[in-house]
């Protein structure tokens, strides 16, 4: 589509055709896709793992048009791709163990609520069609059931074209384990197991193969059940049979069949040494699996782990994030050496735009080693030396999960993130942010300034920069003001610093007070220099100072790209950083600094004194009420308003729902942060851009 014009997959293609505009959802337009394929002379379509990959009608229409569909038959997708039909079919035709639940046709909320009570809480409500964690909610109490069902049905209707839902008993001490299969209509081969228990929002973010907890007997039984399911329907192409494993009872239950290639298929390829996509093409071309001797005996060798790097903020409820990737570098590029058995599957490069139109995943990183311990260590090392600047990602969370002691416990469950949330989402220690990484931003900014001034100095090249007539006056000393938005790192407020040279390689860092009161903002509108000066001194009175010795040991910079690597000597330590100038002018710069040692990226805004002073009002309002006691809720990105939960003029308490929005294929609930009266600025169905006021909550006078 038009938004993909400069994307990596378009650049890599031998031929690319624009199929429509972003708002038209062209990738789900079956007729348009077939028309383009025929006009291009394509003889086959591979659906990947998008929503149409499990759409039986898509498979049927592609086949009817004379084009080969690289996937299962429409009949297989219809029976297995829909979870309700799959459960009904398997309950009648197989011995595969099923989770207790309800998969009937009656979708009346009252009937479903009664079924949930019969099954017993907690229950899982989920869409019959599709996958990827969409249209899925865990319900622990009857009072929350109806709201959860309506949200699931709504999300499923938008994502898959069907709002039909089913209910299952929710097993709390569970693992998510799946068996990869490949079939040709006559023969089915199990490529053995993967574990996908590390999840957020019911979506996988870390997968590994083999599942380290499974016994040989259970692995064998799960593979046999998967083959039985495939053989019932003479299954052709790749597929995945997913199970819930109850670790307390040491039993497994059928969950669903994904009638497509999975996002996590590379880890299976790494441990069994077989290219699954190549097998799909082989089968689609009429090949028979029995003719491939390497499939006679499948063995898992070593251990593979995959992480999904996603553009999202884990510290803010995993809210998806958009933006431009200023710098993306794989570990081998950062380190300058190759690392064996490391694989990146990504659609981004430096300069790519992460938009609201697609899922938040930007890259998969896969490693293999001879055992699980070494694979974990390698992945931590590789992930720490992978750089993605300009867009907020879950990189730090992934690193924390891999390094967590309980990840070494083979019995970890799908509740891992929830159980360890306090540690995994602990706010980042500010010491590194306020010294070492800060100095990297300062020195990089100064080097950039020096280069710009030298380039345009001309006849004034011999005049030193920073000349002042009153060098002892605090307000006239050459200095930089730097702010850091800590909400991306788990903190509620920003940090602000003043940095100036104390001597050649010595810098004085002043941590400025951010305790501004709303009434102080009136100073912004008074143009008298004396008031501005007094306001500056008021901030300096609250500073905390430290002196830091910092110098560049080595720098590699590409001024045209504004990216580079720094080796700094800070105090008595050497530090290594990757730096990118996200935006730049002479008075304000945004600089992202990445520390491979910490696996941490921090964005700094570097301002001159006048620009910093001009932000008094903005800083006074950040994160708080304005002077009239109003809290404004702005759209964090372009979005679609799905539901209004609080009517205009209604009273709300802290934590009450205000509205539900959708962006990047994710539903996001906006909740009141303070009690008060609601003023709603949007309505159901509104499509709004980033930064629009959606609603306000005014603090009641008696509060």
Image (cartoon, rainbow, N blue to C red):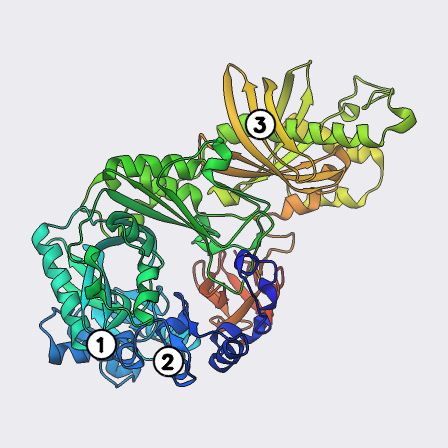
Cα–Cα gap, marks 3 and 2: 53 Å
Dot 2: element: loop
Mark nearer the N terminus (3 vs 1)? 1
The image shows a total of numbered marks equal to 3
Asked if the residue under mark 1 is in contact with the one under mark 3, i.e. CB atoms within 8 Å, the reply is no
Question: Which residue is disc 1 drawn over?
Answer: 86
Name the residue nearer the viewer: 292 or 555: 292
Relative to residue 619, is residue 183 depicted above or below? below
Dot 1: element: helix
Relative to residue 550, is residue 302 depicted above or below? below
Image quadrant for the N terminus?
bottom right
Residue 302: x, y in percent? 23, 42
Check residue 566 in the rendering and tell me which mark sits there, or answer none. Answer: 3
Left or right? Give the position of 412 relative to 516: left
Cα–Cα gap, marks 3 and 1: 56 Å
The image quadrant of residue 570 is top right
Asked if the residue under mark 2 is in contact with the one under mark 1, i.e. CB atoms within 8 Å, the reply is no
The image quadrant of residue 654 is bottom left
Check residue 681 in the rendering and tell me which mark sits there, or answer none. Answer: none
Relative to residue 285, is residue 576 depicted above or below? above
Name the residue nearer the viewer: 548 or 380: 380
Residue drawn at (72%, 26%) of the image: 479
Residue 250 visible from this viewpoint: no
Residue 669: x, y in percent? 45, 63
Question: Which residue is disc 2 drawn over?
Answer: 162
């Amino acid at each position: 589509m038009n938004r993909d014009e400069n994307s990596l997959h378009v650049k890599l293609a031998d031929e690319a055709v624009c199929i429509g505009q972003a708002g038209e959802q062209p990738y789900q337009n079956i007729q348009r896709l077939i028309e383009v394929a025929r006009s291009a002379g394509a003889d086959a379509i591979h659906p990947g793992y998008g929503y149409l990959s499990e759409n039986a009608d898509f498979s049927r229409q592609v086949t009817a048009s004379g084009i080969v569909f690289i996937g299962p038959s429409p009949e297989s997708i219809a029976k297995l791709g829909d979870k309700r039909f799959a459960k009904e079919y398997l309950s009648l035709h197989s011995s595969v163990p099923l989770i207790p639940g309800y998969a009937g046709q009656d979708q009346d909320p009252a009937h479903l609520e009664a079924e949930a009570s019969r099954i017993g809480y907690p229950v899982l409500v989920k869409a019959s069609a599709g996958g990827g964690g969409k249209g899925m909610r865990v319900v622990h109490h009857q009072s929350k059931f109806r709201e959860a069902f309506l949200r699931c049905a709504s999300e499923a209707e938008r994502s898959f074209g069907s709002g039909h839902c089913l209910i299952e008993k929710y097993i709390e001490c569970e693992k998510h384990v799946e068996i990869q299969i490949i079939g040709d209509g006559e023969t089915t081969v199990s490529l053995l197991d993967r574990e996908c228990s590390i999840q957020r929002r019911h979506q996988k973010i870390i997968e590994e193969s083999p599942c380290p907890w499974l016994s040989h007997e259970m692995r064998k039984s799960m593979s046999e059940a998967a083959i039985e399911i495939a053989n019932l329907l003479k299954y052709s192409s790749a597929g995945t049979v997913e199970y819930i494993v109850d670790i307390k009872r040491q039993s497994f239950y059928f969950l669903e069949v994904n009638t497509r290639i999975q996002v996590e298929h590379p880890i299976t390829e790494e441990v069994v040494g077989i290219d699954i996509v190549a097998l799909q093409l082989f089968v689609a071309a009429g090949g028979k699996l029995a003719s491939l001797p390497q499939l006679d005996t499948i063995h898992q060798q070593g251990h593979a782990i995959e992480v999904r790097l996603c553009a999202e903020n884990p510290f803010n409820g995993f809210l998806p994030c958009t933006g431009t990737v200023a710098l993306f570098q794989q570990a081998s590029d950062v380190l300058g050496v190759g690392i064996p058995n490391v694989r990146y599957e990504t659609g981004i490069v430096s300069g790519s735009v992460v938009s609201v139109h697609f899922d938040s995943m930007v890259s998969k990183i896969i490693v293999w080693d001879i055992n699980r311990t070494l694979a974990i260590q390698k992945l931590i090392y590789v992930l720490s030396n992978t750089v993605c600047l300009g867009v907020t990602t879950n990189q730090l969370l992934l690193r924390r999960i891999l390094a967590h002691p309980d990840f070494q416990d083979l019995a970890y469950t799908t509740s891992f993130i929830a159980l360890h949330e306090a540690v995994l989402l602990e706010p980042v220690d500010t010491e590194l942010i306020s010294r070492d990484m800060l100095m990297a931003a300062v020195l990089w900014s100064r080097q950039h300034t020096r280069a710009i001034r030298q380039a345009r100095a001309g006849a004034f090249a011999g005049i030193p920069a920073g000349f002042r007539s009153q060098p002892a006056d605090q307000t006239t000393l050459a200095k930089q003001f730097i702010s850091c938005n800590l909400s991306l790192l788990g903190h509620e407020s920003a940090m602000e610093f003043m940095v100036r040279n104390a001597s050649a390689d010595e810098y004085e860092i002043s941590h400025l007070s951010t305790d501004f009161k709303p009434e102080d903002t009136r100073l912004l509108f008074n143009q008298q220099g004396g008031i501005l000066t007094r306001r500056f001194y008021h901030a300096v009175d609250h500073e905390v100072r430290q002196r830091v010795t910092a110098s560049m040991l080595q720098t590699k910079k590409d001024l045209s790209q504004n990216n580079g690597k720094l080796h700094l000597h800070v105090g008595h330590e050497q530090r290594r950083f990757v730096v990118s100038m996200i935006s730049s002018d002479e008075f304000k710069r945004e600089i992202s600094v990445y520390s491979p040692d910490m696996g941490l990226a921090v964005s700094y805004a570097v301002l001159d004194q006048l620009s910093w002073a001009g932000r008094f009002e903005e800083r006074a309002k950040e994160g708080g009420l304005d002077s009239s006691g109003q809290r404004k809720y702005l759209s964090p990105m372009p979005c679609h308003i799905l539901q209004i939960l609080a009517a205009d003029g209604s009273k709300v308490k802290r934590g009450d729902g205000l509205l539900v929005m959708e962006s990047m294929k994710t539903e996001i609930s906006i909740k009141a942060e303070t009690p008060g009266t609601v003023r709603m600025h949007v309505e159901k169905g509104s499509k709004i851009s980033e930064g629009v006021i959606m609603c306000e909550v005014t603090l009641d006078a008696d509060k």
